[in-house]
Amino acid sequence: MAGCTAAAAPEPARHPTIVSLNPCTDAILAEVAEKDQVLALSHYSRDPQASSMDVSLARTYGTTGGTVEEVLALDPQVVVGGTYMQPATRAAFVRLGMRVETIDIASSVDDSIAQVRKLAALAGYPERGEALVRRIEAAVQRGRWDGPAVPAILWQLGGTVPGDSALVSQLMANAGLANQTAARGMGQAEYLSLERMLSDPPRVLLVAGDERGQHHPVLQDVPGMATVPFDPTLLYCAGPTIVRVADRLAAIRRAIS
């Protein structure tokens, strides 16, 4: 008679094995999961120009380019990626019996904290997630500037600027650096030419790009404008990167004052 009853569904593992296909989830999982749980990170995290985590640490993990064949060979219980994952790829993982979790681009500190908690719970170590959350919150509080804000422009890769709703704009405001391009009506990823920037220069210019105009000698001679280099890898992800961004912006604001 026991053979005629339906088998009980297996309970999900408390500490499942995971493959991460996204550099932003790589950085979080490296802090909240056990190392042997994470079977592979995305190949981006091994690239110093694309990684949002310690590259030397990333190179101690396995890596994957994200193909179904590569992930299947690792046989993880959970696949974690970005929301841009191709539907066909996601469907293949599910058909092969893998749980798929996706993480969107965080547009606020609160969004990022929610993602940290989600991934820490997924890995089975919520307390590690809370420890990272406390570090993020402490960095934001540490970087808060209570005095008047100064006009600033963040000039990103490709000559683009962040929109007012971008996470980095929120962190700039927290540090007393007002996003001047947003005040001009420029939106997310709009192109800012050297000529347009010079027509109304900010008090602080954060240069995170490598276009010729972004390193033009004239930038050093604009009266009243401080030109400051800004590491572009601080702009790719949220999570633990928020700690470094908040501290960097706070240091810049203190120096300007």
Image (cartoon, rainbow, N blue to C red):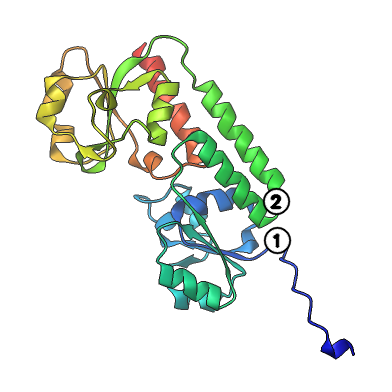
Amino acid type indicated by mark 1: His
Compared to residue 26, the image places residue 168 above or below, namely above
Q: Name the residue under label 1.
A: 15
Q: Where is residue 96 in the image (x, y as percent from the top left)?
A: 55, 78
The answer to which of 112 and 52 lies nearer the viewer is: 112
Q: Distance between the residues labelled 2 and 1?
A: 8 Å
Q: Residue at x 51, y 57 (%)?
A: 102
Lower position in the chain sequence, tag 2 or tag 1: 1
The answer to whether residue 213 is left or right of residue 43 is: left
Q: Where is residue 86 in the image (x, y as percent from the top left)?
A: 40, 66
> Which corner quadrant holds the C terminus?
top left
Q: Residues within 10 Å of mark 1 (few under 14, many from 20)?
A: some
Q: Name the residue under label 2.
A: 125
Residues under numbered marks 2 and 1 in contact, where contact means CB atoms less than 8 Å apart = yes
Residue closest to the far right: 1
> Which corner quadrant holds the N terminus?
bottom right
The answer to which image quadrant residue 95 occupies is: bottom right
Compared to residue 251, the image places residue 136 above or below, namely below
Q: Residue at x 39, y 9 (%)?
A: 148
The answer to whether residue 169 is left or right of residue 37 is: left
Q: Which residue is drawn at 13% across and 31% down?
A: 194
Compared to residue 62, the image places residue 150 above or below, namely above
The answer to which of 142 and 105 lies nearer the viewer is: 105
